[in-house]
Image (cartoon, helix red, strand yellow):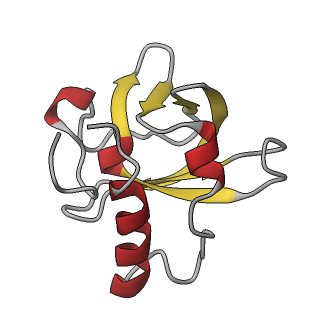
Amino acid sequence: MSDNIWGYEQTSGHTAGTDLIGYKVEATDGHIGKVDKHSDDADSAYLVVDTGVWIFGKHVLLPAGTVRSIDAADQKIFVELTKEQIKNSPEFDKDKHVGDAGYHQQVGEYYGSHRNR
């Protein structure tokens, strides 16, 4: 697994430019929500996932490095995290998630320490 939490793994099946909005997101132990927004920016790729009623409408920021695989045919994204790890993640901040290096560092450190290696 790559050390860059903000980049897709080569084995994930991700193709740059693919519109992932609306894809279902699956943790290692079940469904967590749908992609609301995403970015393919180099060294800053991410998914913003709307968890719906699962965590009362919370949005979470998932760095691209947490993505294990993408099934384009079924429009599903599988991440290497449990539902509990995602639920306990740093609060998503829509004003800081773009361009705030400190916020990205906080999120990256959290998920980097929880990735299955």
Where does the image place residue 92, in percent across and percent down from the top left? 60, 69
Name the residue rendered at 25%, 26% in the picture.
13
Residue placed most toward the observer, 91 or 76: 91
User: In x, y percent, where is residue 23?
Assistant: 54, 32
Looking at the rendering, which quadrant does residue 90 occupy? bottom right
Image position, residue 36 (x, y; %): 60, 50
Q: Quadrant of the C terminus?
A: top left
The residue at the far top in this view is: 73
Q: Which residue is rendered at x = 71% and y = 46% of the image? A: 51
Residue for point 63% across, 44% down: 84
Quadrant containing the N terminus is: top left
* x, y percent for residue 107: 43, 68
Is 64 left or right of 51, judged from the image as shown?
A: left
Q: Is residue 61 above or below residue 23?
A: below
In the figure, 103 relative to 9: above or below?
Answer: below
Q: Quadrant of residue 46?
A: bottom left
Camera-side residue of 111 and 44: 111
Total numbered circles: 0
Residue 110 vs 86, above or below: the answer is below
Q: Is residue 117 left or right of residue 49?
A: left
In the image, taking residue 45 as reference, residue 92 lies left or right, namely right
Q: Is residue 56 above or below residue 67?
A: below
> Which residue occupies 31% across, 57% down?
45
